[in-house]
Image (spheres, coloured by chain):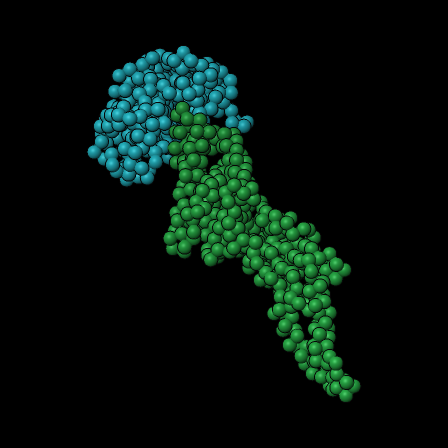
Amino acid sequence: MFKILQKELKALFKDRRAMMLGLLMPIILISIFSLAFGGMNKESNRKTRLLVCDEDKTIFSQKLVADIDSVKNFETATTTTDSAIDLIKNGKYPAAFIIHKGFTDSANAVKPLPWELKYDVAQSVEMQMMQQYLFQSLYASIGKRMNERMMLRNMQQQFAGMDSLSMMMAIGQMKKNVDAGAKNMQELRENIMRIKSEPIEKAPDNAGIVQAVAGTAVMMLLFSLTAMGGRLLEEKENGTLKRLLYSPLTASDILGGKMLASILFAMIQLIIMFSFSSMVFGLVLVPKIAAVLLLIVVTAFACSGFGMFLASVVKSRDQLQSLSTLAILSMSVIGGSMVPSFLMPSWMQTVGHASINYWSIQGFYDIFWRQLPITDFVFLKKVLVLFLFGSVLSTMAFRLFRKNVTSMA
Amino acid sequence: MIEVKDITKSYGKTQAVKGISFSIKDGECFGLLGPNGAGKSSTINMLSMLFPPDTGSITINGTNASNANAQVKQIMGIVPQEIALYEKFTAWENILFWGSIYGVSGKQLTNKAEELLKWVGLFDRRKDLVKDYSGGMKRRINIACALLHSPKVLLLDEPTVGVDPQSRNLIFELIQQLNKDGMTIIYTTHYMEEAEKLCDKIGIMDNGKIIAQGTLDELKTLSAVSDMIVVDCTQTPDEKFLSDKLKTNVAVNENTVTILSNDSKKDLTNIVTTCTDAGYGITRIDIQKANLETVFLKMTGKQLRD
């Protein structure tokens, strides 16, 4: 038994890179998961980016804008309503709070306030939390003034044209009005200060399915394509790579053929996943089929490039297994495959841009949540980024493979 | 047909091939004989254009190999030392694939595949997965896969490693038949019997150099010895002690002593006396006529399988 132990340890230490990856991987993954999810419950870590549009432009509305800006949960920017809608559509901001013209007049007349919250349908979950913060800050800013005005309105309605005796009685009534304050509060919430809140596009009925399908599909695709990249190492180990290189095929022919097989496999895998989701979970594909197919092609290209790149970098299948698990889980966490990226700290959301998962999932959000047409630049930008991912990774894979092919064989 | 001039190859600081030259005529069977690590596989890899030599040149069929890589590869068939087959494919699938990458297709490919499978005696098992084949069967398919495009030159890199004697004889017959049909063969091995049996010309490699080359008779003459005396002892003799006493090249491999001799009758008495006096019990004595082993021993002072 001791001899076997010795042999196993020797074999382990032979491939030092694989051993290091195996040891470091859990530590790195724990760090990434902690950074991504650990910040979720710390409100201070999560600042919601909010556009504020002041169409009223009065002293009262400007004070409200300043008060919103001072709230620690918000990172605000002011702009016009039209540009706010564009910025949300482009995915630059999740929401805009719009103070319409006539806001001060309505406040003075104690009428429902003309303000509303417009938001990205892809951020619906976050908006539920955001509305709580927003109402708290709005109430802190103008709630007292609105309450006073409502009390005055009530007094004027109750004591109009009365004599002094009646006025004495009014004082007593004032006390009752204190009790009515609570009722006023309810009216403020439900009527006067109610924020009209809606996404800029109509949310689909099966919004949750999109996150589940897109997130899982990309992550699983990365795993299966890395396994396909591993075939290259398998060919090295069983001698068939050397035999292929003896033939008139070039190194580029060999890697190119493998890459095309990966892309084709990836496309089939994604088509099956989305077709299954359509049949079982009712994901509506038909009107968006062209955009879905375009995104499937570039996602397959990017993921195949990733698989081939990893296979060209490592020297053994043990190394590939460790490195790919680390890279794929990391990308899946920061890119939003495991949980939606808007639930992570904002800096982590920015880091997520470095993952294939992020761009692919956002592309699927564009199609299914934001209902963008295939010609919309916002959607095409994601297609372009995924294409660039695929191009850069496969170019690097080809270069490394051509450079190392003889030693690999 | 093939002209190799002063080629070298280094891996880092290690020079595996140290300026070797040889030529092979059309239809000839050329053997590269040498122990493991002699530089045979590096030479084969350069001949098959897996990588170019660091210096020197290789001309195949009148074309400089480094200038017309794909063109030259098309006329060469290579049987690698490893069984380079897809084990999860059937023999039929393997053979079609390896033929197709040389541009053979359609009816021509299936006809040739059928012909080769019958030739190697595996047509009836063509639908079986390669992983279910015996070592000898895999070796035969390994050879067949190199012949789909009817190459003019066939390079075989130790094609009988790990094969049972029956399969080995079958492989010899296949190679002899190919050579008889006019195919130029380059055959590497560290078994002198294989080189003696198959090759018209032999190059003996050791430590990256060709130390002797020619026909079998030329090489035997070169060794200038007629016999080789092989003595098995009860324990491992001291090589230096025996060399000093007998005043000739002595090779010791475990308990076996090998000594070159021009007069075996006279030398045998001397050897037996020396061994017995030194306390080495003798269990077997064999006198062999000069062969490639004799040549190698004469040239290098060591046995092929050292």
Residue B161 pos. (x, y %) = 34, 31
Query: Residue A23, image x and y in percent?
Result: 54, 50
Which chain does the cyan colour mark?
A: B
Q: Is residue A215 above or below residue B197?
A: below
Q: Nearer the viewer, residue B98 or B141?
A: B98
Look at the image and tell me whether residue B110 can be seen: yes
Question: Residue B43, position in %: x, y?
Answer: 43, 22
Q: Colour of chain A?
A: green
Question: Which residue lies at the image location 65% right of the left edge and 61% below the top edge?
Answer: A114
Residue drawn 39% across the image and 51% down it = A276
Q: Which image quadrant for residue A117?
A: bottom right
User: Is residue B217 shown left or right of residue B36?
Assistant: left
Decide: is B225 above or below B112: above
Residue at far right of view = A164
Relative placement, left or right, of A265 versus A383 is: left
Q: Nearer the viewer, residue A155 or A203?
A: A155
Q: Which of the pair A370/A210 is nearer the observer?
A: A370
